[in-house]
C-alpha cells in the first residue's frame, strides 16, 4: 500500500464489506502517519456514513471511498454511492434534550459526524450521492 491517496470500491455494499474497507482505511491511515485522535475520528466518520449506505441506500450497487491527507493536520474523505438521492446532512439535528420516550429514532450518528468535521458536504451528481467530510481544524 502506498502513502498516497486511499481508494476503495465495494460492489453491493454490505456491512461485512464496510468492515473490510474500514480495516484497509485504518492501515492506510497508519501508514500515512495520521495521528491517533484523527485516525479514530476518520474511522468513526467512515463507519457511520458507509454503514448508512449499506443499511439504507435504496438501490445502491456500488460504494466508492476516497481519502487523502490535505494538510499535516487535515484529512478528507468522500463516499460515493449509486443509490437513490439522499442528503444525510439535510435532516435537522435530533433534540437530545427531550426525554427518550419523546425522541424520534436515528440521526445521532450524523450528528456525531457534523460535530467531528471541520466541513461536511453533500452533492448528487450524475446519479450518484457524494458525501464529503474534512477532519482537522
Image (cartoon, grey):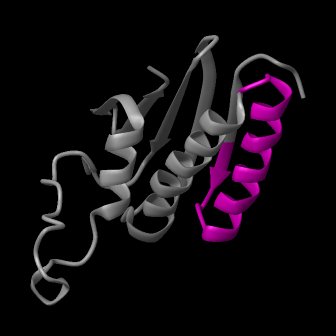
- Where is the N terminus found, in terms of image quarters? top right
Horizontal relation, residue 113 to residue 65: left or right: left
- Residue 40 in which image quadrant: top right
Where 126 sits versus 101, above or below? above
Q: Position of residue 22 (x, y in %)?
A: 70, 51
Q: Position of residue 37 (x, y in %)?
A: 63, 38
Q: What's the residue at 65%, 51% (across, down)? A: 10
Where 7 sits versus 115, above or below? above
- Residue 109 in which image quadrant: bottom left
Q: Nearer the viewer, residue 38 or 126?
A: 38
- Residue 15 in which image quadrant: bottom right
Whether residue 129 appears in magenta in the rendering, the answer is no
Where 86 sits versus 74, above or below? below
Residue located farthest toward the top when viewing the structure as drawn:
71
Whether residue 10 appears in magenta in the rendering, the answer is yes
Q: Nearer the viewer, residue 100 or 83?
A: 100
Horizontal relation, residue 50 to residue 105: left or right: right
Q: Nearer the viewer, residue 76 or 94?
A: 94
State how many labels appear.
Answer: 0
Query: Overall secondary structure of the magenta stretch?
Result: helix
Q: What's the residue at 31%, 30% (across, down)? A: 121
Horizontal relation, residue 64 to residue 22: left or right: left
Residue located farthest toward the bottom when viewing the structure as drawn:
101
What segment carries the magenta color? 9-34
Where 90 sits versus 131, above or below? below
- Where is the C terminus found, in terms of image quarters? top left
Q: What's the residue at 39%, 37% (across, down)? A: 131
Q: Position of residue 62 (x, y in %)?
A: 55, 51
Amino acid at each position: 500500500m502506498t502513502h498516497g491517496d486511499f481508494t476503495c470500491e465495494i460492489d453491493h455494499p454490505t456491512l461485512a464489506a464496510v468492515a473490510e474497507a474500514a480495516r484497509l482505511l485504518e492501515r492506510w491511515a497508519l501508514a500515512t502517519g495520521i495521528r491517533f485522535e484523527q485516525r479514530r475520528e476518520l474511522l468513526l466518520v467512515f463507519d457511520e456514513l458507509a454503514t448508512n449506505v449499506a443499511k439504507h441506500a435504496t438501490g445502491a450497487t456500488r460504494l466508492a471511498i476516497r481519502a487523502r491527507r490535505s494538510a499535516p493536520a487535515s484529512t478528507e474523505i468522500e463516499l460515493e454511492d449509486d443509490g437513490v438521492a439522499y442528503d444525510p446532512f439535510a435532516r435537522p439535528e435530533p433534540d437530545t434534550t427531550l426525554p427518550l420516550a419523546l425522541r424520534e429514532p436515528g440521526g445521532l450518528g450524523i450528528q456525531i459526524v457534523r460535530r467531528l468535521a471541520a466541513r461536511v458536504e453533500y452533492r448528487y451528481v450524475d446519479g450518484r450521492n457524494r458525501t464529503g467530510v474534512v477532519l482537522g481544524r
